[in-house]
Image: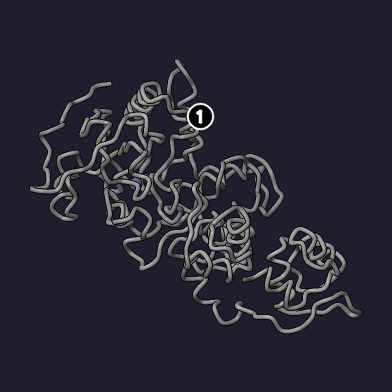
């Protein structure tokens, strides 16, 4: 691996400087692509400083197509590339746009060698080598547009020749033995090929495991919606053809965007007036957390914990959002939209009756108790209400009256 030390030679801001950290605060290695077909450390530095006003280039390393590595910063420098995760991440940028071109062996090998070296030096495991899109708040971003599961398995493939494991992603469209329709529950190589194709197009189907699970389904639905064909989550001839022919929209210049910059108090979205909320320790607290809890039917205690995360995930699933338990701009927007319909207040005593009581108030109770949200107040809901009442130390009668409602939601 050939490395060129460019520290101190690249364009820098006249007055702003990046802060520094100790090496042991580094927990992640972040992989990026530049989303441009050409580029260099010099060009990215100019862009980051002159256009974005950053203290210096965003990446610690830039790997070009021939596999030459540019060293841009000490590892102690907290440069900008993954927003609020910058403090504990090292950034490697591969020059190229892997949504439209494929990653060549020289560049891949150099990136793998560099990453392995950093893993050793910083004592970072392969599980903590993440693509940009895998960092909290970035699930909407198609960077680095390579299959990270494959990349991680190549990192582990110690000693052996590092060769491309990714097959021709379009092979699944022409095979003879392939099934005509692919849908949930199917397994096999054709599913794997489907996942690879979705992945390469930036639709993020999750692990490339050959199993048509919920994340693959979700990716297919998003793809169908994007290309405006029938949205059924089933890959038939029409979807297959669309997958083959899809060119995608040219991505905005990725090699750094304002969202990669951390915010004043580390948690605020620069593009939004509200914070990104997620489950971290210590837990995030505040009025915005309470607002989310009210809307997703979680216990309103103002702390973003496990229950809130789970309810946010349910909410995201119901609204066809990416299910990550993180309240970012898209989830905030969806929460805003349902404000009026979902914010059901206390209406009536809820108990098991024949026929079962039905309604949004029942659904809200069910969501808060983590039972199936069928909106019908049946025996399972009643049992959960009893358990909840017992844990709260109030009268255990399986009936939701004002007191139980209040305990559940305020
Ligand atoms: Zn990136």
The x, y position of residue 240, in whole percent, is 56, 55
Residue at 48 percent of width and 55 percent of height: 284
Q: In this orientation, does residue 129 appear? A: yes
Near mark 1 (Cα within 10 A), the count class, few <14, some 14-19 or many ≥20, is few
In the visual, does 232 lie left or right of 36? right
Q: Give the colour scheme shown.
A: one colour
Query: Looking at the rendering, in which quadrant would you find the N terminus?
Result: top left
Work out which residue is located at the far left of the displayed protein and give it.
Answer: 14
In the visual, does 384 lie left or right of 209? right
* Residue 124 figure quarter: top left
Secondary element at tag 1: helix
In the visual, does 252 lie left or right of 174? left
- Position of residue 134 relative to residue 310, above or below, is above
The x, y position of residue 184, in whole percent, is 69, 53
* Residue 316 figure quarter: bottom right
187 vs 148, nearest the viewer: 148
Residue at 59 percent of width and 42 percent of height: 192
Work out which residue is located at the far top of the displayed protein and give it.
Answer: 159
Residue at 48 percent of width and 67 percent of height: 287
Q: In this orientation, does residue 236 appear? A: no
- Position of residue 74 relative to residue 12, above or below, is above
166 vs 143, nearest the viewer: 143
- Position of residue 119 relative to residue 29, above or below, is above
- Asked if ligand 1 lies within 8 A of label 1, the reply is no
The x, y position of residue 196, in whole percent, is 52, 44
98 vs 299, nearest the viewer: 299
In the visual, does 403 lie left or right of 273? right
- Position of residue 195 relative to residue 124, above or below, is below
Q: Which residue is mark 1?
A: 153
Residue at 33 percent of width and 36 percent of height: 90
The x, y position of residue 346, in whole percent, is 69, 81
């Amino acid at each position: 691996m050939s490395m060129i030390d460019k520290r101190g030679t690249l364009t820098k801001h006249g007055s702003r400087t990046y802060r520094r950290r100790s090496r042991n605060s580094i927990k992640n290695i972040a992989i990026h692509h530049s989303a441009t077909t050409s580029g260099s450390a010099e060009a990215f530095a100019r862009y980051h400083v002159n256009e974005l006003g950053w203290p210096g280039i965003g990446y610690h390393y830039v790997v070009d197509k021939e596999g030459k590595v540019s060293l841009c910063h000490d590892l102690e420098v907290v440069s900008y590339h993954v927003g609020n995760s910058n403090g504990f991440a090292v950034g490697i940028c591969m020059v190229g746009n892997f949504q439209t071109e494929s990653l060549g062996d020289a560049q891949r090998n150099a990136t793998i060698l560099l990453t392995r070296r950093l893993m050793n030096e910083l004592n970072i495991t392969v599980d903590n080598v993440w693509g940009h899109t895998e960092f909290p708040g970035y699930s909407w971003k198609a960077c680095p547009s390579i299959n990270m599961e494959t990349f991680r398995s190549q990192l582990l493939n110690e000693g052996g020749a590092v060769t491309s494991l990714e097959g021709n992603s379009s092979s699944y469209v022409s095979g003879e033995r392939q099934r005509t329709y692919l849908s949930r529950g199917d397994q096999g190589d054709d599913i794997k090929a489907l996942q690879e194709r979705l992945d390469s197009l930036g639709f993020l189907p999750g692990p490339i495991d050959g199993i048509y699970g919920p994340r693959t389904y979700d990716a297919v639905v998003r793809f169908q919606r994007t290309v405006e064909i029938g949205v059924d989550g089933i890959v038939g001839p029409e979807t297959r053809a669309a997958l083959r022919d899809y060119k995608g929209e040219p991505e905005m210049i990725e090699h750094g965007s304002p969202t990669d910059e951390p915010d004043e108090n580390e948690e605020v979205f620069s593009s939004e007036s509200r914070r990104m909320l997620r489950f971290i320790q210590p837990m995030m607290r505040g009025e915005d957390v309470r607002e989310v809890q009210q809307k997703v039917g979680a216990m309103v205690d103002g702390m973003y914990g496990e229950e809130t995360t789970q309810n946010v995930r349910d909410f995201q699933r119901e609204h066809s959002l990416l299910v990550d338990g993180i309240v970012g701009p898209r989830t905030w927007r969806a929460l805003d939209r349902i404000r009026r319909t979902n914010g059901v207040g206390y209406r009536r005593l809820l108990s098991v009756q024949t026929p079962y009581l039905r309604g949004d108030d029942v659904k809200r109770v069910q969501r808060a108790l983590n039972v199936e949200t069928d909106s019908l107040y049946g025996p399972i809901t009643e049992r959960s209400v009893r358990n909840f009442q017992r844990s709260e130390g109030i009268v255990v009668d399986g009936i939701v009256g004002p007191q139980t409602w209040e305990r559940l939601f305020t």
